[in-house]
Amino acid sequence: MTSETTLNPALTDWNGLNGLPRFEAVSDDDFAPAFEAALKEHEAEIDAIASNPDAPTFENTVIALEIAGDSLSRVSALFWNRAGAHTNDAIQALEREIAPKMSRHYSKIGMNATLFQRIDTLWENRETLGLNTEATRVLERHWKGFVKSGAKLPTDEQERLAAINEKLAALGASFGQNVLADEKSWSLILSDEAELTGLPPFLTDAMASAARERGEEGKYAVTLSRSIIEPFLTFSENRELREQAFKAWAARGENGGDTDNREIVRETLALRSDMAKLLGYGNYAELKLDNTMAKTADAVNDLLKAVWAKALKRAGEEEADIAELIAREGKNHEVMPWDWRHYAEKIRAEKFDFSEAELKPYLQLEKIIDACFDVASRLFGIRAVEKKGVPAYHPDVRVFEIRDRDDKLIALFLGDYFARSSKRSGAWMSAFQSQHKLPLKNGRHGELPIIYNVCNFAKPAEGKPALLSLDDARTLFHEFGHALHGMLSNVTYPSVSGTSVSRDFVELPSQLYEHWLTVPDILKQYAVHVETGAPMPQTLLDKVLAARTFNAGFNTVEFTSSALVDMTFHTREAVEDPMTVQAEILGEIGMPKSIVMRHATPHFQHIFSGGYSAGYYSYMWSEVLDADAFSAFEETGDAFNGETARKLKDNIYSVGGAIDPEDAYRAFRGKLPSPEAMLRKKGLAATEELSGSDA
């Protein structure tokens, strides 16, 4: 079964366009035997490195580790893409099996005493090896990785750590699958026209398409896809339906039965605490924050709490405005979470004289994709060439070549934009293959980055253009910013390529890129009406720009409450009942009854299945950086200033983890930022608070 003759070569021999995988040649049944063979091959490579009779050198140990496991990397890249973006029962069953098996495999490598001895010898003698900065960081990454994998622990504790990692991998896979199951299984089918009161055509079109997908032709489905649920909560005039939909959205992972995540959360937190103690840390947050920019939980909480106070004050003012509008409408109910988006949109329309529905016809998906590419061209001199007819992992996925000023191919990019029931919610960037320059065993020298973006925009009816909300458009720019971080990478070693940076630095390139969406020149060129082709009127553009900080209190309270709960979970000695702790923390910080956490604990995938445990704060940490970084362009008076763009590319987008993030940022900006520019961007800082700021 695992002999090479029975394995599908399409899993590891990628001979599609410019080295793209031939997705159409891979079936679900191919993965299990391929994983078995690839794991054995990687194990043999590791054993060969560890047992090398020659004295350890950077080349025969570190570089050998860097290029080992190529087959496993390829099989994994294809599998995890399918598990996240186009899954099914067979893939999910294999995911539950593979996640702990992969953990077991890497635990065994991390606890290989002979291999660690070689790495440790190199680390102790690093000053004599003649390594440059990047090579030194690669060595450090390997050394720290071994230490955090338990290489210095006694055997019994190593075995305990390996068991913890294996169980955590299984729990994380189950957590994500449970959320997807809850999202997939729930829908609110509407058939009475009266139930559609207030809903704009773009939303009813998307709901009709979702109903058809569920076999309800001629009806309308409210689903838990963000691209449908959020506009429904915004525009529906039916408060009872809003409440019903909101409560289903908020209850993902908390519905009892097989998909309930609360016990998974409790067990996950207990295991993470045990892991941290085994490795000599006071708590799991200490373990995760080691080697980040923030460094300590206190530094994180200081930032979060300072912003929380300002956000809470602003949210109180926003809630008072909503309560006043409810009263003006002759109603007497209090402001509840299913009311906020609805009335905030009415206030925005009133205050700034435009609505999301008025804006949406100017935000066509095709045009915003073009805008993403144009900004990259102006800043970094690259262009995207779509390759029609090239098969990808789903018919909706589009393939692009990314070329530089000299027409040299530098990357492949895949865009997967529409929601479907086989795709987990949210938006993300990932890589099938990361850039590097090392010679490989197959004869290739270095590799081209193959990067993809996944989004969940509402798919329009056949023949109609996809229209985005302003938040959707920001999401597209955000994820393409991550993609650029991968595609512009220019490093030697794969382990520091692209987005392989500290968690609280990785969001800088993505959040920074969002700024160019609302540069007036970009909006004027690409925000054109879907029917007339006319550019967005200057009056509407001015209103959009003036409203950028509208509802900032609500948005920041949603986020910051989630980040504070995350940090509490991972700094507490023990969390016996996570839901009680969540309620306790929200009570302590004064969480308004009218707002809920952006990600309640039972569906908080970022921290329980997505790699952001004790790290959700990093979006705000990076926001401090991105606000200051964009100020570098504003100070020149040109959002596309060539010299500033060159420094941005050379010091941020292309260096990956090859240099320390603080050094990278200083090389770009000349200094580290303070939070004031971020607070100003959010509209949470008074003018006098900014005096004397270096932002």
Image (spheres, rainbow, N blue to C red):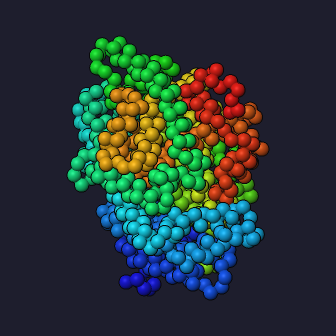
Residue 357 x %, y %: 44, 29
Quadrant in the picture for the N terminus: bottom left
- Residue 421 at least partly seen: no
**Total numbered circles:** 0
Quadrant in the picture for the C terminus: top right
Residue at 39%, 64% (x, y): give it: 164
Residue 666 x %, y %: 72, 46
Residue at 47%, 53% (x, y): give it: 282
Q: With 94 as the anchor, is 153 left or right in this view?
A: right
Residue 166 x %, y %: 39, 66
Compared to residue 215, the image places residue 147 above or below, namely: below
Q: Viewer-proximal residue, 129 or 153? A: 153
Q: Viewer-proximal residue, 167 or 216? A: 167
Residue at 67%, 54% (x, y): give it: 660
Compared to residue 255, the image places residue 50 above or below, namely: below
- Residue 678 at least partly seen: yes
Residue 389 x %, y %: 51, 61
Q: Viewer-proximal residue, 34 or 227? A: 34
Q: With 52 as the anchor, is 257 left or right in this view?
A: left
Compared to residue 127, the image places residue 626 above or below, namely: above
Q: Report which quarter residue 538 is drawn in.
A: top right
Q: With 486 as the anchor, is 609 left or right in this view?
A: left
